[in-house]
Image: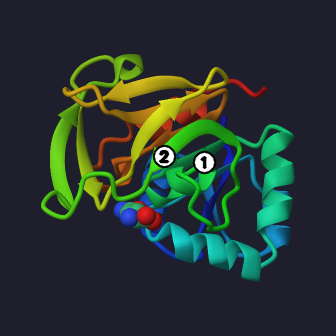
Amino acid sequence: MKRTIGILALQGDFAEHRAAVERLGHEVVEVRLPSDLDRIDGLIIPGGESTTIGKLLVDFSLLEPLRVRVNAGLPVFGTCAGAIVLARDIGGLAQPLIGVMDIVIKRNAFGRQLQSFEANVDVPVLGSPPMHAIFIRAPAIEQVGPRAEVIARMADGTIVAARQGNLIATAFHPELTGDDRLHRYWLSLPPP
Ligand code: GLN
């Protein structure tokens, strides 16, 4: 069924997400205003800079209405900076978060020498092959609380994707490789 998917378009790589959603046959709305939220059946929060995205969510009066919609069941897919703003805790750092996922995230977890890297990541819900994952100043998911579950780990055990109902957070950028399986999986999750 064709859905209308919002892509938060305040900052970051929203154009790549737009292309992935359109390849899957859905309609896209770029979300910048609170009224845009009324038209969407799901929301993608792209990678970028989480402090900037958080600040703009406040400046554009989107943070609170978004939290209300997510708590009412709006499906959300957050990649990298998008995953950070979904987390309930980012190690006590003070920056605006939607904060709806029961995960603890560490920003820039891979340090300076590994600011950007690529790795094959096994995502069991997608079967094989593994996803070719691009990490750009990526966070890591340090803890997954009882309301959420791990959906992908690196070979060393680091958690890089989690799910809570129809919310998905990934530390990497599935929108950059043309592999739409994770977008398709998120779109297939049942409503709450
Ligand atoms: N390091 C960025 C942050 O903390 C995230 C990077 C990204 O989205 N690629 O917001």
Coordinates of residue 112 in the picture (x, y in percent): 19, 64
Q: Is residue 24 visible?
A: no
Q: Nearer the viewer, residue 99 or 75?
A: 99
Query: Which of marks 2 and 1 precedes in the sequence?
Result: 1
User: Which residue in the rendered view is the most extreme toward the bottom?
Assistant: 59
Few, some or many residues within 10 Å of mark 2 (<14, 14–19, 20+): many
Q: Pointers 1 and 2 in contact (CB under 8 A)? A: yes
Q: How many marks?
A: 2
Coordinates of residue 92 in the picture (x, y in percent): 58, 55
Q: Secondary structure at mark 2?
A: strand
Q: Secondary structure at mark 1?
A: strand
> Is residue 123 found left or right of 112 in the rendered image?
right
Few, some or many residues within 10 Å of mark 1 (<14, 14–19, 20+): many
Q: Nearer the viewer, residue 123 or 113?
A: 113
User: Which kind of residue does numbered mark 2 sit on?
Assistant: Ile
Where is mark 1, residue-wise? Answer: 89
For the point 84% across and 62% down, the residue is 64
